[in-house]
Each structure stands twice: as structure tokens, then as C-alpha cells.
Image: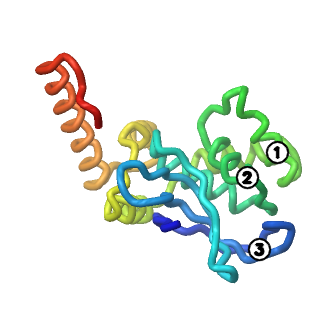
Amino acid sequence: MSLIIATIGTRSEKVVDGRRQQVIPFVGADREGEFAQIGIGFILPDEKKGGIWGTAFPNALIQSWRGMKILEQIDCIGNATLCACWTIAQRTIHVSDERHFNKLAEQVGGADKLQTLRTEILGSAPSADELDAMITNLRLKHVDVSDQELREEVRSGRISTSILIEAIVRETEEHRHARNREKGETGTLSPM
């Protein structure tokens, strides 16, 4: 597996596969190209292996960063831990995803403590330099980043816009206009 690392988190010791190991959390993608899944993962530097969990759409970079920040606070990485961290890094937890919240709450000292942590992390965002570096690292490998998430984060004031963010928004708009023109000319969209 060829992982694409957008940024790394704080190295720490966690229980993985039943034993304590050094872990480096990261935000990244599972492969290069347009079908890449952006998400969160971890590297076991002593074993030179790791894991990643993400989605192909939407490629929510900042949600993944927040999921990584939650992962940094979790002591044990199990089967669904990466998915759980990413899922509860959403603004609203859907009722069907409450099981992820409950699973992680056990590891941090209860639901109240996890909610406090979650609120703090949801109010934070990567620095402008870190965000630009993440976007650059992914774009160098042809991995798309969701313009919708970036627009919402700028609108809410959690991040400031940048040349890279404006380029993503502009490119996405141009792509949409081209697809709409194509649809208007033929009545249907060609396969992507």
C-alpha cells in the first residue's frame, strides 16, 4: 500500500494489536489519483506498517485533521477506531453513528469528557501553513480536496482563505460549468 501523508500528528504510545507500541497518527490518502480516499491513519514506526481509514467522497480534509486530533487522545486502536474518530469529528453526529461516540467515550473517561474534547477539537483547525502544506502534499499526488468543506470552514471563520483554497474553489467551479455545458449539449453526462 502506498500511503500519501498530508500531515502527521503527535507521536505517542498506544495499545495496538494488544500491545503498547509507538504510534504516529496522520492525515492522508490511501493512494494517488482521483479515486483516493482521504482520512486518518497511523504508522507503527518500529514495525514499518500502519493503517488508514477514509472516504472517497467527500474528501473532507479538515474533518480528517480533526479526527486525527481525536485519535491522538485515544489510548487503544482497535478495528473501528479510525472510523470512529473520523465520524465523531463531524459537526453533527447522526443517530446511526452514536455507537462510535459511545465506543470512544469508554477510552477517555466517559461521554462528558469526550464531548468536551470533541467541542474543543471542532472549534479548532489546522494553521494556515499546515493546511496549505496538506493541500499541497495531496495535490502533488493528484488527490482532490472537497471545496465544499473548505468554503464552509472559511464562511464560519474557522480558517482563512488562501491562494490554494481559492484555486480549489475556482477549479471546482470550472469543472462544474464544463460538466453542465456538456450536459446541456448532449442532454446527458459522459462517464467520469
- Residue 85, percent from left and from top: 68, 49
Q: Give the alpha-carbon distance from disc 2 to disc 3, as whole Å.
A: 15 Å
Question: What residue occupies the far bottom of the structure in this picture?
Answer: 46
Question: Which label was assigned to residue 5?
Answer: none
Whether residues under marks 3 and 1 lie with C-beta atoms below 8 angstroms apart, the answer is no
110 or 145, which lies in front?
145
Q: Which residue is mark 2?
A: 81
Q: Which structural element holds mark 2? A: helix
Residue at 23% from the left image edge and 30% from the top image edge: 190
- Residue 20, percent from left and from top: 83, 74
Residue at 73% from the left image edge and 77% from the top image edge: 22
Q: Is residue 72 above or below residue 97?
A: below
Q: Which residue is mark 1?
A: 103
Q: Which structural element holds mark 3? A: strand
- Residue 88, percent from left and from top: 67, 42
126 or 42, which lies in front?
42
Q: Which residue is mark 3?
A: 13
Q: Residues within 10 Å of mark 3 (few under 14, many from 20)?
A: some
Q: Residues within 10 Å of mark 2 (few under 14, many from 20)?
A: some
164 or 30, which lies in front?
30
Q: Which residue type does callout 3 highlight? A: Glu
Q: Earlier in the sequence, mark 2 or mark 3?
A: 3
Q: Which structural element holds mark 1? A: helix
